Image: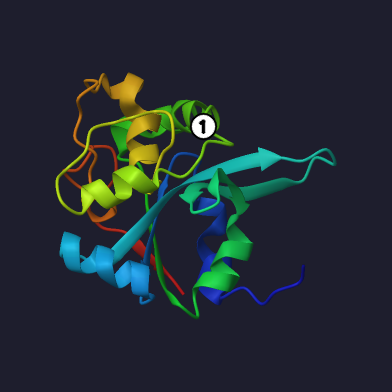
Amino acid sequence: MTTAIPTTYHKYRNEIKTGDLILFESKDFFSRIIAWKTGSAITHAAMAFWMMGPTGKSRLYILEAVIFGFYPNYFSNRVAWYLPHGDIYWYKIIKPLRHLGADAADKLLDYVGSYYDFKDVILQAFKRVTLHPGAIFCSEAIALAWKDILELPDDYIVPYPSELPGRGLGVYEKTGVKIQ
């Protein structure tokens, strides 16, 4: 598929590392409900992941939980599709933990093919939920990726997507870069 990719995607693409956080801000109906509940326009989270294809070409993916389940998606395709509908932000892993980004992404690959956790997303609107590694939703996936590395307890409260940078998990820089 040939799509026009925004200039800043090309500018930052090669700086993005496996394990970095990608956050999304959207204006669709479901996202507005999430934004109202969480008090933040950020409504979706994914993890960057570099993978080499059979021809030796490296591709940048994101690992994300969406209504169809948890799977990798070409980041360039997601950028091209998403930007007319909202904004995308990239957050680096903090320097002392950057070497662990591949470990976090590797753990997250264990969840490829998992179902989307509609039940916990709905519950999260009324009370905070804890990690449940069966079916997963977006910010839960990011927390699960870091669970063993950070030694998070089984009853860890799943953060909202907007809570992941800065103090959230303590893994990502507080300030991100807008991809446009």
Q: Nearer the viewer, residue 29 or 49?
A: 29
Q: For the view shown, which residue lies furthest in the right direction? A: 55
Q: Quadrant of the N terminus?
A: bottom right
Residue 26 visible in this rendered orientation of the protein = no
| In the depicted structure, whether residue 102 falls above or below residue 151 | below
Question: Circle 1 sits on which residue?
Answer: 111
Q: Nearer the viewer, residue 162 or 171?
A: 162
Q: Is residue 85 left or right of residue 80?
A: left
Q: Is residue 45 left or right of residue 5?
A: left
- Rendering coords of residue 56 (x, y %): 80, 40
Give the image quarter of residue 167.
Answer: top left
Q: Amino acid at mark 1?
A: Tyr
- Rendering coords of residue 20 (x, y %): 42, 45
Q: For the view shown, which residue lies furthest in the front direction? A: 119
- Rendering coords of residue 73 (x, y %): 61, 52
Q: Residue at x 18, y 62 (%)?
A: 37
Q: Residue at x 39, y 28 (%)?
A: 133
Residue 2 visible in this rendered orientation of the protein = yes
Structure colour scheme: rainbow
Q: Residue at x 55, y 51 (%)?
A: 68
SS class, disc 1: loop
Q: Is residue 16 left or right of residue 4?
A: left
| Count of numbered circles in the view | 1
| In the depicted structure, whether residue 33 falls above or below residue 84 | above
- Rendering coords of residue 147 (x, y %): 32, 25
Q: For the view shown, which residue lies furthest in the bottom direction? A: 84
Q: Residue at x 56, y 75 (%)?
A: 7
Give the image quarter of residue 120.
Answer: top left
Q: Is residue 126 left or right of residue 73?
A: left
- Categorize mark 1 by other alpha carbons within 10 Å: few (<14), some (14-19), many (20+): many
